[in-house]
Amino acid sequence: MARKRKQESTPSASGDASQPPKKQQQQLIKQEQQELQQSKQQQEAEAREQRAVEYEEVEEEVEEEVEVEEEVEEEVEEEEEEEEEEEVEEEEEEEEEDNQAANEDDDEPIQKLLEPFSKDQLIALLFEAATQHRDVADRIRQMADVDPVHRKIFVHGLGWEATAETLTNAFKQYGEIENCKAVCDKVSGKSKGYGFILFKSRRGARNALKEPQKKIGNRMTACQLASIGPVPTQGGVQSAPSQQQQQQQQHQQQVSEYTQRK
């Protein structure tokens, strides 16, 4: 009986001893799987880092290429600008040489050359010079500011009661007035229907002429630059005598005096 029990106990002991190695194998397998997974993840991380490094290197190379291209373009542009400047300088030198040669061949004063020119020719020459040279344009504007031709306005269509004060009140809003005159009849003292305003600057005259028709008192009047000339008489309103009419009147007076003496 004792031997039987001993034999029964022996197989159970062997069965219990065989179980631990299986668990150990399973643990080893899990460890190996974990190690494989970790190594795989590490490899993937290293691959990502390698790709990132390669990408940065590629970006740096691209940036360097772009910088090189920009430098080349700048050099090309600078060369083209230098070539254009050289061409312009050469053209200017040629023009100066041509002008010097022309001046050496023609010593006649400019004033004598301009005297036979017509008004249109002189205007064309001055316009061309003013567009090419700023100082000429500035000088023309300065002369225009001084000349009353660009500052004096002729007003017609005034009522019989109009005075210099009436004109001043109507036009002072456009600029400072230097002189103002309402032409009146010597006998009756009433207005002849027209007058003159001289502004201190061209700007005042230009502002006033932006609206040529103005209501002064109870009458609708019209204004223009006095240098343009008189306006035909309309509705009993007299216009200012022109310089040509004044010259004709003076000539007639001189002729009548000569005939009387004769």
Image (cartoon, rainbow, N blue to C red):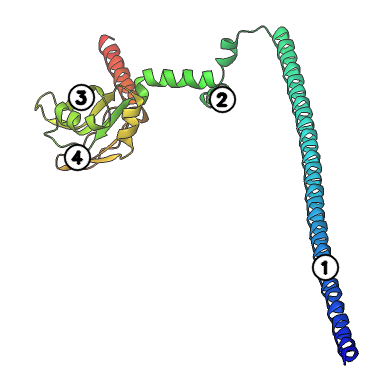
Name the amino acid type tagged 1: Gln
The residue to which callout 3 is attached is 181
Image spot of residue 195 (x, y percent): 22, 29
Q: Nearer the viewer, residue 202 or 250?
A: 202
Name the amino acid type tagged 2: Gln
Q: Residues within 10 Å of mark 4 (few under 14, many from 20)?
A: few
Residue 117 figure quarter:
top right
Position of the C terminus, as image quadrant, is: top left
Which of label 1 and label 4 is nearer to you?
Answer: 1
Which element is circle 2 on? Answer: helix
Which of label 1 and label 2 is nearer to you?
Answer: 1
- Are discs 3 and 1 less than 8 Å apart at CB? no
- Are discs 1 and 4 less than 8 Å apart at CB? no
The residue to which callout 2 is attached is 121
The residue to which callout 4 is attached is 236
The residue to which callout 1 is attached is 33
Drawn side of residue 245 relative to residue 95, left or right: left
Drawn side of residue 61 relative to residue 210, left or right: right
Q: Nearer the viewer, residue 154 or 172?
A: 172
Name the amino acid type tagged 3: Lys
Outermost residue to the front:
2
